[in-house]
Amino acid sequence: MFDQSALKEIVNNAIINLSFDIGSDRLIDPVKYVLSMGGKRMRPVLSLMACNLFSDKIDHAVIPVTGIEIFHNFTLVHDDIMDNARIRRGFPTVHTKWNINQAILSGDVMAFITNECFLQSPAHLLPRVLKVFNRAAIEVCAGQQLDMDFERATYVSQADYIRMIGLKTAALIAASLKIGAIFGGADDKDAGHLYEYGKNLGLAFQIQDDILDVFGDMKVFGKTAGGDIIEGKKTFLYVRANETGSFDQKKKLQDLYASNAFKPEDKIRMVTELYELLDVKSSSEKIVADYFKDALEHLGKVNISRERKEGLIGLTSSLAGRDQ
Amino acid sequence: MFDQSALKEIVNNAIINLSFDIGSDRLIDPVKYVLSMGGKRMRPVLSLMACNLFSDKIDHAVIPVTGIEIFHNFTLVHDDIMDNARIRRGFPTVHTKWNINQAILSGDVMAFITNECFLQSPAHLLPRVLKVFNRAAIEVCAGQQLDMDFERATYVSQADYIRMIGLKTAALIAASLKIGAIFGGADDKDAGHLYEYGKNLGLAFQIQDDILDVFGDMKVFGKTAGGDIIEGKKTFLYVRANETGSFDQKKKLQDLYASNAFKPEDKIRMVTELYELLDVKSSSEKIVADYFKDALEHLGKVNISRERKEGLIGLTSSLAGRDQ
C-alpha cells in the first residue's frame, strides 16, 4: 500500500504534468501559480487512500482525483476575491497579483480543467464518480453562499454553522473519499461509509482550524493568532460563545467583534478571555473529538481488513492531535 | 421532425422545470433571473436540430443540451462583470442587480448545474458528449481571455480577431451541433461536418453582429446603433478598417476610438463615415457570406437525405438574411 507522503508526491507530479493545451499563457499562468503554492493536497491524497483500501492499483484514479485538487483551488481563487483576501499560503492571492477579472476567468477555466481530469476516468466509472463530485461542487457553492450570508447575519446558531461547514468544507472531503472508494471497486455500502467518514473528518478538521486560529501554537500553525477575530469571522468559537454565554456576555462579544476602537492585540486578548471564561475551547475540542470518533466508527464499518485501514486510521489520529 | 420554435419551447420548458435542489434561494435566485431573461436559446435549439437530423427521438438529449444554455448564461454573467456591463437583454445584469460577489458565486454554481444536466445523458454517451462540451468550455474561456487582451492591445489583426471569436463564440455553437449529432447517433464523420457547420455559422453570426451594431436597422435590431464604437470595442469592422486603411486613415480611426472629445453621435458618425470610405461594410458582408457558404457546404456533406436537412438549411438562410 501507498503511504501518505508517496501519494502526495504522486498528486504533485500529476499536477506538474498536467498539460494545459489552451494556447493562452495569460489565462493559464494564474492557474499554474495557485497550484504551485503547495498545500497539503488533502483531498486527492484521501481519495487515493480510499481507493488503495480496496485495490492495489490506483493509477486509473490519479488524474481524476487530481481534478478535485484543481476544483478546490478554483474555489480558493474565487473565495479570495469574495473575501477580499490578499494573502494565501504566504503568497499574494491571484486577484492581488493580477486583477479581479483575471482571477474570475482563470478561476472559471479551472472548473473545466477539473472536468477534463474527470474525463480521464475509465468510461464505465465516469458517470458515478462525476455525479458524486458534482453534487459536492454544488454543495461547496451553497456553503460559500451561507458563509457570505453569515457575514451579514446578526445571529448564527451552532446548527447553522455546522450546516455551512458541512457544505463548504466537509462535502468535498466526503466526496473525495467516496470517489476514491468507487475507483477502488468498493460496493455502495462501503463507499457510503467512506463518505460519512470524510464528512465527519471534514467537520472535525474545520472546527479544529477555528480553535487553532485562536489557541494554536503559532510557531507551528504559521499564522498570526486571532486572525479570524480581527477579520470578524463568525467561527465555531464565536457561534458557540453566542449559544452558551449570558445575555451580557453575548452582548460584550458582539460589541467587541463589531468595534474598531481597540488595537488588534487588545481585541484578540479580550475575545480570547471571554472564550476562556465561557469554556468555549474545551467544549469545542470535545465536539471535535466526537466528530473524529464518528469518523473512525464509519471507517470501522468498512468491510476491509483492519490492516489495510491503518493508513487512514493513522491519518485520522494525527489530524486529531495536530497543533497546526 | 421538430421545427425551430417547437424546439425552443422544449428547451424553455426544460429550463423552467430544472429543479435546483440546493437549499439556497440567495444562490439560485440570480440563476433563475438570468435564465428568465429569455434569449434565442440558439445553442440547444441547434443541438436538438442536429440530433433530430439523425433520429426522430430527441428526449434523451433535451436536458443535456439545456446544460449548454446554462453554461452560455454562466459565461454571460461572468463576462458582464469583466466588461462592466450594466444591461443585458434590457435587464440589469446580475452584478448590477445584486453585487459582484453574488454574480461570481451564482455564476460558478451554473457551471456545475451544467454538469448536472450532462449527467442526465445516457451513460454510454456521457464520455463523448461531455468531452466535446468541455473542450468548447475551455475554448470559450480562452476566447474571453483574448477578448480582454485585445482591449489593451494597440493592434489586432483580422486573423487574431477571427481566432478570438472562433474560441469565444463559434466553438460552443460548433460543439452544440456535434453534441446533438452524437445524441442522434451520427458517426464521427457526420458529427465532424456538423461541428464545422457550426464553427462557420458561429463565425458568420458574430461578424454579422458587429456589422449590425453599426449598420443594422435599429428599429429591428433593438439596440442603439454604434454601441460598440462608444464602448471602444475592437470589432471586425474596426479590425478590418485597420488592415485596409492608409496610414492616415488608420491613425484617424485609432484617434477617434481613443478620444473622449466628441459627442457620442458625432463619434459614431465619423467612424461610420470612415468605414464607408474604406468599404468595410460590404467587404465584411462578403466574408460573412463566405462563412455561411462554407457552413452550408459542410451541412451538404452530412450523409443524410436533403429533406431532413431542410430545417438547418432554412435556419442558415434566415440567419444569413437577418437584419436583427
Image: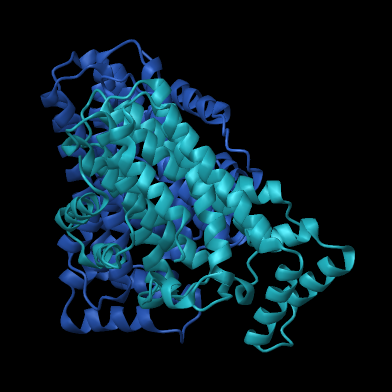
Chain colours: A cyan, B blue
Q: At which x and y percent is residue A61?
A: 23, 37
Q: Is residue B246 left or right of residue B169?
A: left
Is B34 located above or below residue B190 in the figure? Answer: below
| Front residue of A201 and B273 | A201
Q: At which x and y percent is residue B135?
A: 24, 43
Is B246 located above or below residue A176 in the figure? Answer: below
- Asked if residue B86 shows in the view, the reply is no
Q: Quadrant of the N terminus of chain B?
A: top left
| Front residue of B248 and A299 | A299
- Asked if residue A263 shows in the view, the reply is yes
Q: At which x and y percent is residue A24?
A: 21, 62
Q: At which x and y percent is residue B79?
A: 43, 58
The number of numbered badges drawn on the structure is 0
> Which residue shows up at 59% across the image and 41% down it?
B32
> Which residue shows up at 65% across the image and 79% down it?
A268
Q: Quadrant of residue A78?
A: bottom left
Residue furthest top in the image = B56
> Which residue shows up at 77% across the image and 71% down it?
A253
Is A269 located above or below residue B235 in the figure? Answer: below
Q: Quadrant of residue A28?
A: bottom left
Residue furthest right in the image = A247
